[in-house]
């Protein structure tokens, strides 16, 4: 009975001191196999428990290292994807957003006859101020009905197209580098005014698409940076829950669409198997939880 009691106390002390800094020393000092006070069974129990503790610690350390690598690589892929999104945007528009200046584009549109759909050549095209109707640029339509106005500011202006035998068409619009609908001319006389916006044309402007792409690229880089921080936290092994939260934010970095988030998610799953490595991981009873 005395031996059973000592074995029970031995197991309890080894388990409660697994996460302690000097747990092994305390157990061995209190129950030293060399002291002659322990039986062969007790010595074997001490050796197997300490060996199992070392093996479990080494395995958890390897898993934690692999988890950090997976999270780090997935986050790096996310940052690279965000940089690619930013590099695909027009430089002038990005600089304009940062410096709060107004970008310019080359406006290119086609003029067609409303009834037949034929291209109209030789019509006068004017680009005017909205309020004063001061002419800023003027040109003529070519053989295919196309015209181009270079360096047009992307602010509301008035486009006027006129020609003999056709109703003069005035369009209130913002210049777009692409996606502008053709101007249709109706035979007759007089004039008509049309208010054209991006919503009226049913298409997104290049500015809208670029701003969205820029926003996604910046968000991808930021979340990828949070993922890198999560990888460093895994190496430090201080706060388990905070590390998992940071890695969860890193999932939104969208590295190569799905490949990067899959690596981060796998790292988060592996991290649950080595959570006892973190200093703040404790069970409900206030002692380290080894489950």
Image (spheres, rainbow, N blue to C red):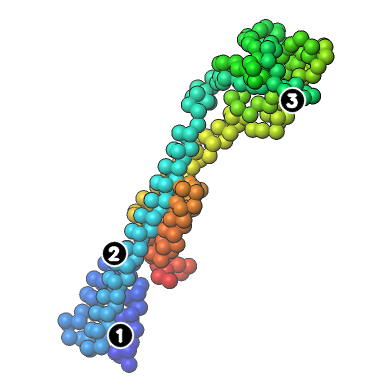
Residue 215 vs 76, above or below: the answer is above
Provide residue 122's location: percent of width, then percent of height.
68, 12
Q: Residue at x 50, y 23 (%)?
A: 92
Q: Residue at x 65, y 15 (%)?
A: 141
- Quarter of the image with the N terminus is bottom left
Q: Which residue is mark 3?
A: 117
Q: CA distance from mark 2 to mark 3?
A: 85 Å
Q: Which residue is mark 1?
A: 6
Q: Is residue 189 left or right of residue 184?
A: right
Q: Looking at the image, is mark 2 or mark 1 earlier in the sequence?
A: 1
Q: CA distance from mark 2 to mark 1?
A: 23 Å
Q: Which residue is mark 2?
A: 21
Q: Is residue 35 left or right of residue 185?
A: left
| Figure label count | 3
Q: Nearer the viewer, mark 3 or mark 1?
A: 3
Residue sitting nearer the eye, 184 or 255: 184
Provide residue 163's location: percent of width, then percent of height.
74, 11
The local crowd at label 1, few if under 14, some if 14 to 19, many if 20 or more residues have their Cα within 10 Å, is some
Q: CA distance from mark 3 to mark 1?
A: 100 Å
Determine the secondary structure under disc 1: helix
Q: Looking at the image, is mark 2 or mark 3 earlier in the sequence?
A: 2
Residue 84 visible in the picture: yes
Check whether the beta carbons of the residues at disc 2 and disc 3 lie within 8 A of each other. no
């Amino acid at each position: 009975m005395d031996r059973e009691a000592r074995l029970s106390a031995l197991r309890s002390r080894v388990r409660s001191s697994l996460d302690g800094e000097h747990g092994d020393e305390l157990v061995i000092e209190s129950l030293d196999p060399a002291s002659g006070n322990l039986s062969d069974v007790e010595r074997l129990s001490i050796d197997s428990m300490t060996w199992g503790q070392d093996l479990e610690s080494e395995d958890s350390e390897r898993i934690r290292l692999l988890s950090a690598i997976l999270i780090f690589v997935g986050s790096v892929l996310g940052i690279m994807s965000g940089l690619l999104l930013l590099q695909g945007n027009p430089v002038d528009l990005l600089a304009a957003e940062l410096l709060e200046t107004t970008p310019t584009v080359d406006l290119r549109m086609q003029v067609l006859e409303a009834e037949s759909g034929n291209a109209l050549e030789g019509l006068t095209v004017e680009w005017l101020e909205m309020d004063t109707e001061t002419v800023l640029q003027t040109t003529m339509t070519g053989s295919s009905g196309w015209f181009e106005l270079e360096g047009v500011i992307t602010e509301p202006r008035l486009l006027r197209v006129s020609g003999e035998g056709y109703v003069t068409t005035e369009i209130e619009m913002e210049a777009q580098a692409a996606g502008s609908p053709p101007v249709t001319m109706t035979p007759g006389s007089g004039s008509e005014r049309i208010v054209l916006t991006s919503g009226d044309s049913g298409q997104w402007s290049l500015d809208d698409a670029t701003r969205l792409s820029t926003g996604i690229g910046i968000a991808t880089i930021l979340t990828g940076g949070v993922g890198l921080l999560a990888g460093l936290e895994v190496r430090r092994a201080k706060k388990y829950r905070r590390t998992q939260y940071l890695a969860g934010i890193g999932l939104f970095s969208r590295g190569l669409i799905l490949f990067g988030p899959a690596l981060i998610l796998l790292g988060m799953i592996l991290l649950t198997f080595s959570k006892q490595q973190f200093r703040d991981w404790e069970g409900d009873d206030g002692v380290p939880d080894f489950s």
